Structures are given as structure tokens and as C-alpha cells.
Image (cartoon, grey):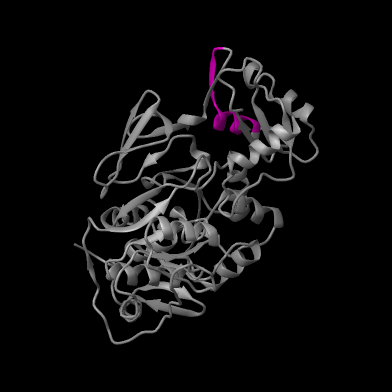
Amino acid sequence: MLPLTSRTPEEVIFHRGDVPVTVRRFLAEVASLAARLPEDGPVLNFCADRYLALLSFAAALSRGHVTLLSADRTPQRLADIARLHGARYALSDTEVALPLPVLAPEAEAGAAAPNPAIPAAMVAAIAFTSGSTGEPRPHAKPWGALVAGARAAAERFAVTPGTSIVGTVPAQHMYGFETTLLLPLQGAGAGHAGAVFYPSDVAEALAAVPAPRLLVTTPLQLRALLGTGIALPAVSAIISATAPLADSLAAEAEAAFGAPVLEIYGATEAGSIASRRTLEGEAWSPYPGVAFAIGENRAEVTVPGLPAPVPLSDVLEAAGGDRFRLVGRQGDMVKLAGKRASLAGLGKILSDVEGVREAMFLAPEDLDHNPRARLAAFVVAPGMSATSVVAALRGRVEPAFLPRPVVMLDELPRDEVGKVQHKDLAGLAWRRS
């Protein structure tokens, strides 16, 4: 059995407006909400307010209800998940039309309440893959694995009870769930309740919480922050995930904000499992207790709290000791003219070209059996042309990997957490080719 929270009663677990919420008050509100929940789960949790999202998760967990988490919060996707996974009710702080009861969680404290004990093997949440390479698939998250991951993250990023955590990633995305809800619940620090997305939101949220401050964000939102030139209150560190982070962007952010930029490596199947400081090199360091087994074109990871090793969709390369480098995704490796390359690796090479802000490569479906098939590149590079992009790539990549077509865009088509949907790129590429 593991406690709902590892924090002491008087510690601040969240900042909600100008009100610091202590663990004692949080536990009382958990008990109050839990008493109002239906008899059975699972439950859909799509609260925008992070504190209400945590409160809803904790109340459901204390009742033995599994929480269904989906980064895609469109009514159709939520309805599909509810139907396929037997959701009995939903918790939301906004109006939404769903074919099941929707309850509004309220932060109402009753009498002092105990810290519930939860079986470590209990499935506390089911997360879903993003769908960028296929339809979303469910991944069960035992309580013990979530606890171990939060405590490992607190250790890795030196989060203390006084650290304020401000996030721009939805709490229903696995990255946001782990860093902005579970980290204060089971690790350390105090979360910020408000929904934060735009640069002005970030500045206001950071100003509203005490130092030291940890900013949890994505490359997309980090670039937006830098693009506005907005001044931010001092931050102790910036954490990024969900998409590759260019060295140039990390360097610009460190110079602008005077704080280290750190990346998390993870997968929905396994959670957050490694990290690095972008400007210190390509190698990743596993979280405490996490072990990687790396073979040719396959890798798996053993994560505390998960019942078995988890196969990864990425191709990894040992980098000395327990560290590793990310080569690319298994479905990301392409072969042309007898040469092999990673689409992600090619994209990084192009992103490092002066004048290029963002770039991605995509392979056509007939690449393996059409000798005339070529890779496509999608490039955000104001002032450059497709011809100049190809010219800049010559000498950097094998001639077989020079893209055709090159699609110049104002921005890549990303979702709210910064992921690019491959189907959207495919439509752009072959429509313009």
C-alpha cells in the first residue's frame, strides 16, 4: 500500500489564485468530493483547472475508480473513450456534452481527513497514445509506477517543497499529468492551478507564485515565449518535452531566461524515464531506478512499479555507462540507395541550418517499393526558398535523402501540446508535389 500523498500536512501542495492550499486542506477536500462520487468508475477527468484535475483524480483514486486521461479533449474523442472503456461518469469544470453523467468538482473542505492508502498494483489511470502515428491506444498506469516516477522526477530535477511548478501542458496529457499533478502529489513542490498557454499567461502565472519557479513547457510554447520578447520572473529551470528541442532554441532560451533548459524523454507506455540538459550533448540519463536494455533496432525499459519490461518504439544507442542516445523511431528509419537514416535525425540536421526555425521529414507510403519515391521536407524558414533549403542540405546529408518536395510553411501543423500529426503533413506534401 502507498499513501495518496507523500507530503506532510502543513506543506503547500498547490497555489490556487492567491490561496496556498496545504496538504491538510487538500485531503479534506478529497474526502468531501469522494463522498459525492457515483458508486462505480471508470471516470473521465478533463478539468482545465489543474487543482481541480488533481482533486478529481485523487477523489476517484480513493474510491478505487480508474481515471481515463486523454490529451485530445474534443467531445467526439471523449465520447469514444467513454464508450470503449466503460466510463460511468465524468468530472469537468466546464460544460461538455457527453452521453454519461458529468459532475462539477468543487473544492469544498469538510472535516480533517486521513491520507488514504492505495494498493500499489491498482490501475490508477489509463493514458492514451497521442495518435500521431496511429489511432490512440490505452496504457494502464499502476499506482506504484506513478508514485515511483514522481519521486524519481523530484530527485532528478532537485524539486524542493518550496518549488513552484507552472505548466503550459494540459493535465490530461501524460507529460503534464506527471509533472504538474503527480510531482506535487508524490514528489515535492507546489503546482499552479490556472490554465496557462499564451506567453502573457506564463508571465502572469510565474509572477503569481513564489520562487524558486520551475516552468514545464514544450518547444512550441518556448519558441512563442522567445518570439514575443516578454520578460519573465526568474525561473530556476525550464523543462521541455513532447517534441524535439533544437540546440539553437535551447541556447536562446537559456540566454534569455538565465536558467538551464532540461528535456524529458518518455513514452506514454512507460511514462517519463530519462532526462538531459540539451546543451550538454545528445546523451540521455535514465531516471533513478530505471534500466534500459538496448539491442540492435530494439530497446526495452524496466520501470519501477510496472509489471514487466516495456518495449519502446524508439531505436536507441548506448552512450557509455547507463546513458543512451536517441537514434529515431522504429517506423522512422528509412533506407534509400543502400543508405539508412532516421527521419527525426534528418529533421534535426535541417533544423540546425542557419535561418531554419523548424523542419520535419516525411516518407511516402510507397518508399520501399517505388524506386522514384523521395522524402518530403516541411520547413519553417522565413526568407528562404525551397531551392536554398536543398542547397544548404547538400554536403550535410547523403544525396539520396535530399527532399523533394520541400514544402515551405509559416508554421508546422501542431496540436495543443506541440505534436505534429503525420496525416496532416502527408496531405500537404503530396497535394503540393
Q: Quadrant of residue 322?
A: top left
Which residue is rendered at x = 62% and y = 44% of the image? 249
Which residue is rendered at x = 42% and y = 35% of the image? 313
Q: Position of residue 413 (x, y in %)?
A: 65, 46
Q: Position of residue 287 (x, y in %)?
A: 34, 45
Question: From the image, which quarter does the N terminus lie in?
Answer: bottom left
Left-right relation of 384 to 319: right
Which residues fall within the magenta stretch?
A: 338-350
Above or below: residue 399 compared with residue 282: above
Question: From the image, which quarter does the C terminus lie in?
Answer: top right
User: Magenta stretch containing residue 196, yes or no?
Assistant: no
Which residue is rendered at x = 61% and y = 63% of the image? 232
Which residue is rendered at x = 32% and y = 55% of the image? 146
Above or below: residue 244 compared with residue 94: above
Left-right relation of 204 to 46: right
Q: Nearer the viewer, residue 28 or 57?
A: 57
Which residue ends up furthest to the left in the rendered image?
Answer: 1
Q: Quadrant of residue 107?
A: bottom left
Above or below: residue 311 compared with residue 140: above
